[in-house]
Amino acid sequence: MIKVDQLSKYFTPLKKVVDAISFEVNKGETLVLLGTSGSGKTTTLRMLNRLIEPSSGTITINGQNILQQPADALRRQMGYVLQETGLFPHYTIAENIAIVPGLLQWPKQQTAARTEELLHKLQLPPHEYSEAYPRELSGGQQQRVGLARALAANPPILLMDEPFGALDPITRGMVRKDFMALDELHQKTIVLVTHDVNEAFIMGTQICLMHEGRIAQIGSPATLLFNPANDFVRNFFSEQRLQLELRIMRIHDTWQWLPSAAPGNNAQPLQPGTSYWDALDQLNTGGAFFVQYQGETKSVTSEALFTALNQYKAQKQ
Ligand SMILES: Nc1ncnc2c1ncn2[C@@H]1O[C@H](COP(=O)(O)OP(=O)(O)OP(=O)(O)O)[C@@H](O)[C@H]1O
């Protein structure tokens, strides 16, 4: 678990770039640092791996103060993914992925097996890509290698700074989806910097919204959206509000407001945990759908979903 307590950073005496922020991230969670440009997100992330030393405050990992351990030992428990992948151009893909296992003196066979496993999982068939050089890969493929390299030695912590930021929206979505499908992420503590609101809502278990070095609000995506702490938070999400609501709402969240109705003959099942976004996507194909949950069966239509969403929101206010 990462615990940050009253953390501050000033590069000049007059301006606190990060101003007394505190948060906790547990195993299996992704904390997203979200905010406008210059709000202190990257500085915060870089204090976690000691690329930047804090001016005051403490950071502990599993109860141990990180300033009391050697920086290189600290960094070996952390995968680090950057927008500019930082792949070594004269190393093959396999050699790039093997960098940290090499530092940890893993046996060659173990490194080769892990590299192959990660290339498979990230949709880069090893026979095509292991011996290629970064310049032979597209931007999206290079970012997949960057992810594999960060994950190679199975670090318990992953720090990610705009990891998909250099990619076009379609590639970005595909790389992110394959990354999020990795089972091993459930065992990790992840801190991710982005200024993409949608990405924050797709990836974050907690969102820490920063403004001028301070935390405007920290909480689950639903808390920030439905219970904003102040006007800054409310306005930050106003442009994409409906899309964000549809992304975070699951059918079971509004179960009590969905009308009971027997499904038609050709109706297909949807999982109760399906997001509104995905359910509406399916409904757009013209099919009929039903959901079984808590011993009840309900048929699901777009109209019923929107009515239930409005009732859910009215109850939240
Ligand atoms: N080494 C440094 N020396 C002086 N000022 C710095 C240094 N690093 C960052 N800053 C300043 O700190 C502020 C916060 O920068 P930071 O990169 O943490 O913001 P950010 O929220 O990640 O922004 P962006 O989304 O644009 O990357 C900025 O005003 C930046 O100019």
Image (cartoon, helix red, strand yellow):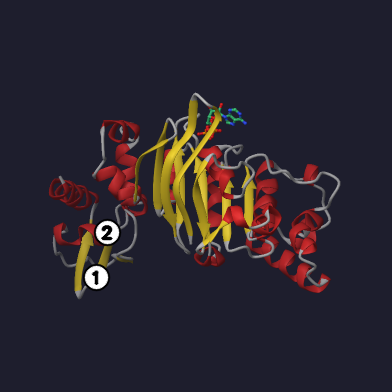
Q: Quadrant of the C terminus?
A: top left
Between 287 and 229, the residue placed more toward the observer is 229
| Element class at badge 2 | helix
The kind of residue on which mark 2 rests is Ile
- What residue sits right under mark 2 in the picture? 251
Q: Position of residue 66 (x, y in %)?
A: 58, 55
Q: 10 Å neighbourhood of mark 1: few (<14), some, or many (≥20)? A: few
Q: Residue furthest bottom?
A: 295
Residue at 34% x, 49% y: name it.
Answer: 219
Whether pointer 2 and pointer 1 mark residues with C-beta atoms closer than 8 Å, the reply is yes
**Residue 222 drawn at (x, y percent):** 30, 49
At 57% from the left edge and 51% from the top edge, which residue is drawn?
159
Q: Is residue 38 above or below residue 160?
A: above
Quarter of the rendering containing residue 96: bottom right
Q: Which mark is residue 27?
A: none
Can residue 280 be seen in this snapshot? Answer: no
What amino acid is labelled 1 in the image?
A: Tyr
Q: Give x and y (percent) for residue 36.
A: 45, 31
First along the sequence among labels 2 and 1: 2
Horizontal side, residue 68 vs residue 208: left or right: right
Which residue has dot 1 on it? 293
